[in-house]
Image: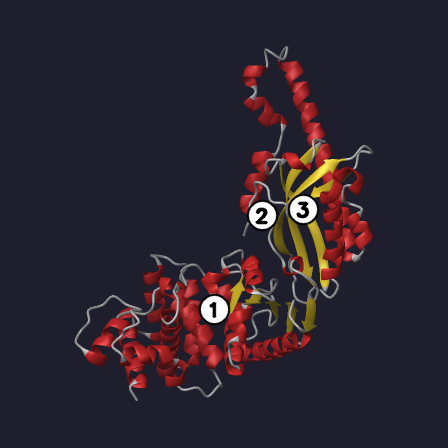
């Protein structure tokens, strides 16, 4: 997903003879002629290529050391403490910590690729020797779970030593004028790994908690496959940070924005699951507040997102993507609509005082007026970015929409509808795509489906 942007950055920062000549036409005469300038440009180009090769050799040594769990060899790729001072000592210590943190992680591959040179301004505090700032793509693979490399971005500084070697002088943790390294769970502390039949849990929590998470993850995979088939990887990787700030760091987001969300599945929309296993990241405070049933529902919900990722696109409405995840999550739990949609039922009973959902006319008073306000339309994508209780109401409306499909057309049609929305290619926009998919699979358009959904909600929650 980031390859195109990284490629553009690499082109922008690469010093080539063509770029130098194009930018320095006005300097040719001052340099004594085109021949002298071309020779200088060629020499500069050759030096950059040599520099790149030397940095990549150091990165290759680092990758070999990580895979071998050889902390001493990894530390040997760092500038000497004698020349780098306390900063170099701290950097060297972080190499030992990285290897220790990875001890239980089943790595199948670990490699680096330079994506840009001169990627950010060099901070003066790190010294005045010959240095280069590079943007690097770390590619790693979890053995037994990733058939393709997962990638992360790092911003590193290398410094040339008197013997000609280029060693790591900064791993990007000192700040600097760059976006910041992608945070991976082993950057946060020693990782414990719990491997099951279908799942891998990587976490910083106590062994008993991680084992319980792994048991739920293993149970969820066959339950999801029973609905969505076996045409996905049928495996999950769950990340279990210890604290909210760690959760936010892994998502590169403000954890406060996810206060009411127990877990998040990350991955590329439309990506095939045959080669990539998406990551399910648990929000520790929200997760711990759930009952055992709640944790089971959430785990199955997120596993459904993994299973449907290949058919989830930018035009897939969130009422459908979140609705099918909740529908699958609640299957077999024995929970009634009233038990599942507590907040929505309360809002209907109180006249919609939570202020969530829809912009239709009030249409009367009391419960009928609340229904008109709350159920004027299927929830919009933006409704899933709110806070409690409106956020819960959006999810509950989405669950009811999928229930209506199953209730009147069968579960197979719900699966078919999801695929049909993806197959539209988003032509004409989301609303048009959904309307076409509804007509193709259920024989009704959005208006008729919404009316049926509204009637089903009112019927179920007024019993």
Question: Can residue 56 be seen?
Answer: no
In the picture as drawn, the residue positioned furthest to the left comes out as: 364
Decide which of 303, 343 is in the foreground and name it. 343
SS for callout 3:
loop
Q: Which residue is mark 1?
A: 261
Sequence-wise, which precedes: disc 1 or disc 3? 3
Question: Can residue 462 be seen?
Answer: yes
| Left or right for 136, reference 378 | right
Q: CA distance from mark 2 to mark 3?
A: 10 Å
Tell me where residue 224 appears, x and y as whole percent. Answer: 53, 77
Decide which of 289, 105 is in the foreground and name it. 289
Dot label at residue 180: 2
Q: Residues within 10 Å of mark 3 (few under 14, many from 20)?
A: some
Q: Residues within 10 Å of mark 1 (few under 14, many from 20)?
A: many
Q: Which residue is mark 3?
A: 171
Residue 400 drawn above or below residue 52: below
Which residue is painted at 78% across and 50% down in the image? 74
Tell me where residue 153 appears, x and y as whole percent. Answer: 61, 49
Which residue is painted at 68% across and 72% down in the image? 194
Q: Residues within 10 Å of mark 2 (few under 14, many from 20)?
A: some
SS for callout 2:
loop
């Amino acid at each position: 997903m980031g390859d195109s942007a990284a490629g553009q950055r690499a082109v922008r920062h690469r010093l080539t003879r063509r770029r130098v000549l194009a930018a320095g036409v006005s300097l040719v005469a001052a340099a004594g002629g085109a021949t002298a300038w071309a020779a200088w440009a060629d020499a500069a180009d050759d030096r950059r290529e040599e520099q790149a090769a030397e940095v990549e050799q150091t990165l290759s040594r680092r990758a070999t050391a990580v895979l071998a769990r050889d902390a001493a060899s990894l530390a040997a790729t760092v500038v000497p403490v004698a020349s780098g001072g306390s900063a170099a000592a701290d950097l060297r210590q972080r190499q030992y910590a990285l290897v220790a943190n990875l001890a239980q992680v089943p790595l199948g591959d670990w490699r680096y690729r330079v994506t840009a040179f001169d990627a950010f301004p060099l901070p003066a505090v790190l010294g005045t020797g010959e240095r280069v700032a590079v943007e690097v793509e770390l590619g790693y693979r979890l053995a037994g779970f990733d058939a393709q490399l997962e990638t992360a971005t790092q911003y590193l500084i290398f410094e040339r030593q008197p013997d000609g070697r280029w060693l790591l002088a900064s791993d990007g943790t000192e700040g600097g004028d760059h976006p910041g390294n992608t945070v991976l769970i082993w950057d946060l502390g020693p990782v414990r790994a719990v491997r099951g039949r279908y799942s891998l849990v990587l976490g910083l929590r106590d062994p008993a908690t991680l084992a319980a998470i792994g048991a739920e993850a293993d149970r969820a995979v066959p339950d999801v496959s029973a609905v969505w088939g076996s045409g996905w990887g049928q495996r999950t990787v769950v990340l279990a940070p210890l604290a909210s700030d760690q959760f936010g760091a892994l998502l590169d987001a403000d954890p406060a924005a996810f206060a009411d969300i127990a877990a998040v599945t990350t991955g590329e929309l439309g990506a095939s699951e045959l080669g990539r296993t998406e990551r399910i990241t648990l929000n520790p405070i929200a997760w711990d507040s759930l009952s055992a049933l709640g944790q089971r529902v959430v785990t199955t919900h997120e596993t459904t997102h993994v299973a449907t990722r290949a058919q989830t696109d930018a035009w897939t409405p969130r009422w459908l993507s979140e609705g099918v995840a909740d529908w699958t999550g609640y299957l077999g739990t024995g929970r009634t609509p009233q038990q599942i949609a507590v907040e929505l039922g309360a809002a209907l009973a109180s006249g919609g005082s939570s202020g969530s959902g829809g912009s239709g006319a009030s249409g009367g008073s009391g419960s009928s007026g609340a229904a008109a306000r709350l159920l004027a339309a299927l929830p919009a994508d933006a409704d899933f970015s709110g806070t409690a209780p409106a956020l819960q109401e959006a999810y509950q409306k989405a669950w009811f929409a999928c229930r209506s499909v199953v209730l009147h057309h069968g579960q197979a049609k719900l699966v078919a509808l999801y695929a049909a929305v993806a197959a539209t290619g988003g032509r004409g926009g989301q609303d048009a795509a959904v309307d076409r998919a509804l007509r193709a699979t259920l024989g009704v358009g959005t208006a008729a489906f919404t009316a049926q959904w509204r009637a089903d909600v009112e019927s179920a929650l007024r019993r």
